[in-house]
Image (cartoon, rainbow, N blue to C red):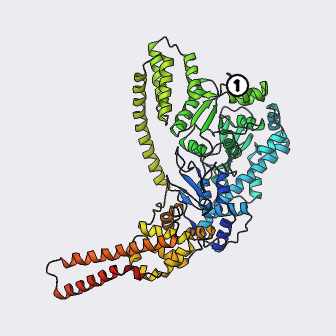
């Protein structure tokens, strides 16, 4: 995602308001509320949340109130971080930070199309929140929902749990909900866009969820974006659980149930407890095990792994101990190991899930199992060995091949070697033989990933109506002068005095217009919020060109650095001009008059180069 959308938004939110929001937000406090930061000198570091890495290259600079990743190039202000991390448009990110800082936003006239998109998303969020409250009230007070309340009671849950999780009940009669939606001024188009309803072929609307216990699904920062409904009366024509379809708000491959509640505990406990269903997650949280989450009707995906890695690199799997549970665990292991994550597994008794186990044997029994979870591969090996006849050479070879495919997904080489040794010892097969199987699996995995990546690229291209912005090309010396002008008032003042002398060189150098714009606007380098607001007002391409500028170290003497860089830049400019003239003078059949003119120009340039230092004000 490109984060530079300030320019298209400043017509709606005044620069003064943006600067006030940034000045009222400490970027270290903000970023540390999303991921753990460690001090590194005068800055703070973490593994980048925007790409997969093992060595921290993501830096937060409190002095400049900016962040920058030296690995993937992501960077910007507090507003840019919220935009990229939460996938929010600019105005929503500003408003989120404004609410956090207690700043009131006064909006100006704005672009109608941009406002329409923002309003549509806002309306969908309003619809989901309103629907959740409607269904919760139905569960708590409707006589027709007595069987839903009885079901919760049979599972050991009462009013308190229902209120904490905003559990609801969707009436069996669709008109009850549709009447509420109409009275709340929601349109049929909005109901269909949300996935709560669908159009009937014969006209009218069909409500997707009926007579179901309803669980709101939140994104990782707390907005309700979808629902999951549990069947209360057995119906073979419908699944036990059904979730909202994918919508502009909800992509199930990128959402965990209860991540909004679990993310702080994950950072503190240093692991995520990945369960199979919502009820198990709720049971864990109600018992004080608050790092529990679950996927939503889908196996783990790379997007899931990357999202989870923002908070922790350690995952404890809590799946059923049957073959289906291990199949799901294998998928999770393959996906998450490829992202450099470490997986353990809870040894659940057969036929038990977290909810049933805590109900029958108590919370401490389950907590003890979580505390004594073991490396996934160790548990996997024990399970397979107990289920197979390993006296059969063919069966042993088949198992070795299956395990080689899993090992091939492991990202860390040392871990991969350790697993190869572990499997070869337990199965009594040669290490090199197993290693060859892993290599074959890696090659096959590479081919599969190639086609998947190519298809993903095609899908992304189809979804993207607009081309992504590319950074404005910028000369290295020009970029450094931009850095000095944005970080030192003295250097900015000195460069402003040289603007006339710099005019010709900047006109011929890539990115020269960016430096001219900085010097003409003169944002106050002593106020990080003013600098970040100024950068945010530029074209997206220019923002990208400056993305790493504020991440550079400041020189001890900024004015001296500006003088030396400027002298070098201007000198290079005039040397290039002189070289071009000499090249012209070597052309055959050059007219005498043109030759004299060029020779005089070359002489003037030599004089300029000789007296270059005197061209700059001291």
Q: Quadrant of residue 273?
A: top right
Query: Which residue lies at the image location 65% right of the left edge and 69% below the top edge?
Result: 18
Name the residue carrying label 1: 352
Q: Position of residue 38 (x, y in %)?
A: 62, 49
Query: Based on the displayed image, in which of its 4 quarters is residue 110 positioned?
Result: bottom right
Location of residue 319 in the rendering, given as x and y in whole percent from the top left corner: 64, 30
How many numbered marks appear? 1
- Which is nearer the eye, 466 or 242? 466
Residue located 34% across and 82% down the image: 608
What residue is rendered at 68% in x and 59% in y? 123
Q: Is residue 440 above or below residue 597?
A: above
Q: Farthest residue toward the bottom?
A: 593
Q: Is 447 situated left or right of 534 in this image?
A: left
Q: Quadrant of residue 117?
A: bottom right
View extreme (left): residue = 589
Tell me the crowding category of disc 1: few under 14, some 14 to 19, or many 20 or more residues within 10 angstroms, Cα based.
Answer: some
Compare residues 611 and 529 and report the one nearer the observer. Answer: 611
Front position in the image: 572 or 519: 572
Q: Position of residue 346 (x, y in %)?
A: 65, 28
Q: Is residue 255 visible?
A: yes
* Residue 473 can be seen, yes or no: no
Q: Secondary structure at mark 1?
A: loop
Residue 23 location in percent, x, y? 67, 67
């Amino acid at each position: 995602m490109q984060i530079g959308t300030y320019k298209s938004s400043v017509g709606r939110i005044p620069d003064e308001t943006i600067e006030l929001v940034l000045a009222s937000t400490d970027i270290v406090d903000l970023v540390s509320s999303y991921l753990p930061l460690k001090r590194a000198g005068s800055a703070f570091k973490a593994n980048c949340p925007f790409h997969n890495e093992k060595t921290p290259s993501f830096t937060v600079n409190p002095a400049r109130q900016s962040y920058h990743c030296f690995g993937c190039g992501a960077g910007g202000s507090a507003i840019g971080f919220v935009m990229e991390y939460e996938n929010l448009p600019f105005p929503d990110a500003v408003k989120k930070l404004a609410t956090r800082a207690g700043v009131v936003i006064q909006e100006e006239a704005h672009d109608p199309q941009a406002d329409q998109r923002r309003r549509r998303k806002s309306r969908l969020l309003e619809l989901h929140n309103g629907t959740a409250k409607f269904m919760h009230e139905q569960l708590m007070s409707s006589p027709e929902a007595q069987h839903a309340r009885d079901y919760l009671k049979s599972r050991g849950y009462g009013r308190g749990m229902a209120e904490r999780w905003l559990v609801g009940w969707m009436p069996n009669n669709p008109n009850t909900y549709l009447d509420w939606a109409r009275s709340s001024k929601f349109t049929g188009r909005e109901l269909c866009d949300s996935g709560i309803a669908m159009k009937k072929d014969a006209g009218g609307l069909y409500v997707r969820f009926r007579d179901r216990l309803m669980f709101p699904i939140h994104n990782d920062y707390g907005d309700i974006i979808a629902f999951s409904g549990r069947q209360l009366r057995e119906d073979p024509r419908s699944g036990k659980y059904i979730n909202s379809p994918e919508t502009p708000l909800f992509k199930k491959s990128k959402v965990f149930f209860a991540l909004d509640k679990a993310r702080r505990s994950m950072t503190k406990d240093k692991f995520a407890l990945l369960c199979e269903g919502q009820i198990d997650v709720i049971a864990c949280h109600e018992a004080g095990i608050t790092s529990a989450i679950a996927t939503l009707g889908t196996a783990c995906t790379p997007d899931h792994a990357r999202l989870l890695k923002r908070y922790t690199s350690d995952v404890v799997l809590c799946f059923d101990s049957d073959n289906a549970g291990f199949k799901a665990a294998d998928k999770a292991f393959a996906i998450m190991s490829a992202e450099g994550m470490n997986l353990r597994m809870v040894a659940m008794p057969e036929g038990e899930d977290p909810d049933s186990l805590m109900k029958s044997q108590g919370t401490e029994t389950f907590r003890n199992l979580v505390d004594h979870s073991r490396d996934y591969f160790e548990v996997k090996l024990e399970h397979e060995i107990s289920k197979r006849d390993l006296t059969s050479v063919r069966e042993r070879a088949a198992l070795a091949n299956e395990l080689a495919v899993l090992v091939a997904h492991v990202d860390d080489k040392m871990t991969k070697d350790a697993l190869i040794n572990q499997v070869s010892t337990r199965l009594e097969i040669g290490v090199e033989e197993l290693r060859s199987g892993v290599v074959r699996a890696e090659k096959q995995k590479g081919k599969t990933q190639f086609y998947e990546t190519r298809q993903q690229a095609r899908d992304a291209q189809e979804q993207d109506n607009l081309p992504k912005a590319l950074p404005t090309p910028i000369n290295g010396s020009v970029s450094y002068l931009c850095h000095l002008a944005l970080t030192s008032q003295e250097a900015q003042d000195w460069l402003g005095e040289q603007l006339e002398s710099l005019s010709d060189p900047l006109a011929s150098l890539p990115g020269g217009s960016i430096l001219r714009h900085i010097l003409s606007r003169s944002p106050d380098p002593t106020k990080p919020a003013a600098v970040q607001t100024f950068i945010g007002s530029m074209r997206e391409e220019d923002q990208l060109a400056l993305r790493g500028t504020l991440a550079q170290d400041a020189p001890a003497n900024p004015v001296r650095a500006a003088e030396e860089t400027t002298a070098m830049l201007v000198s290079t400019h005039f040397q290039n001009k002189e070289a071009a003239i000499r090249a012209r003078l070597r052309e055959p059949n050059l007219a005498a008059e043109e030759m004299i003119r060029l020779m005089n120009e070359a002489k003037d340039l030599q004089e300029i180069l000789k007296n270059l230092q005197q061209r700059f004000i001291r």
